[in-house]
Amino acid sequence: MKNSMLRRFWRIFHVCLPTLWIGNLTLLEPYRPIFIAIVLLFFGWAGWKVHRPIEACEPGTACAIPQTRKRRQIIFWITGIIALVLVTSTYWIPLIASDIE
């Protein structure tokens, strides 16, 4: 009995929670350029850390291992592409949506 009630609550929680806070995100729209600038700063810092010369790494650290460096660079570029798609989505989603109608 207790387990089924918990499952029902969990399902309701998963369905209702996104609809409760999604409306509040429109309040953050005026700050979108600031958030984009912050993301760009973080990507710049991460890019510097990932692509710095191997001589700048201390021996034995993760950045000195070629396989780890390559994996981090691939992950960096994948997340960069995902961020670019998300940042520019306000421009290309209306184009796709207008073609569907």
Image (spheres, helix red, strand yellow):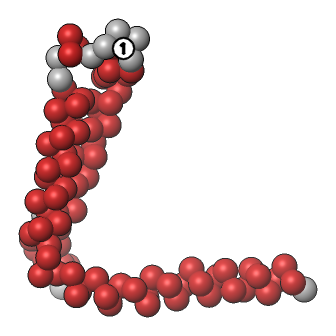
Q: Position of residue 82 (x, y in %)?
A: 25, 52
Can you give x and y, in whole percent of width and height, for residue 98 in the image? 13, 81
Q: Residue 42: x percent and y percent?
A: 20, 49
- Label 1 environment density (alpha carbons within 10 Å; few <14, some 14–19, many ≥20): few
Is 40 left or right of 67, judged from the image as shown? Answer: left
State the image coordinates of residue 76 (x, y, percent, origin top left).
26, 38
- Foreground pick, 16 / 50: 50
Which residue is labeled 1 in the image? 65
Q: Quadrant of the N terminus?
A: bottom right
Outermost residue on the right side: it is 1
Please name the residue shown 21% across and 81% down the image.
Answer: 28
The answer to whether any part of residue 83 appears in the image is yes
Q: Quadrant of the C terminus?
A: bottom left
Of residues 87 and 56, which is closer to you in this image?
A: 56
Q: Residue drawn at (20%, 10%), measured in percent from left and top?
A: 55
From the viewer's perspective, tell me whether residue 68 is left or right of residue 9: left
Give the answer, above or below, for where 77 lies relative to 99: above
Image point 19% across, 46% down: which residue? 43
Q: In the rendered structure, which amino acid carries the disc numbered 1? A: Ile
In the drawing, does residue 1 fall left or right of residue 8? right
Q: Can you say whether 59 is above or below 19 in the image? A: above
Disc 1 on helix, strand or loop?
Answer: loop
In the rendered view, would you say 60 is above or below 71? above
Instruction: Using the rendered view, name the quadrant where residue 5 is placed.
Output: bottom right
**Residue at x 17%, y 23% (from the top left corner):** 52
Residue at the front extreme? 58
* 94 or 4: nearer the viewer: 4
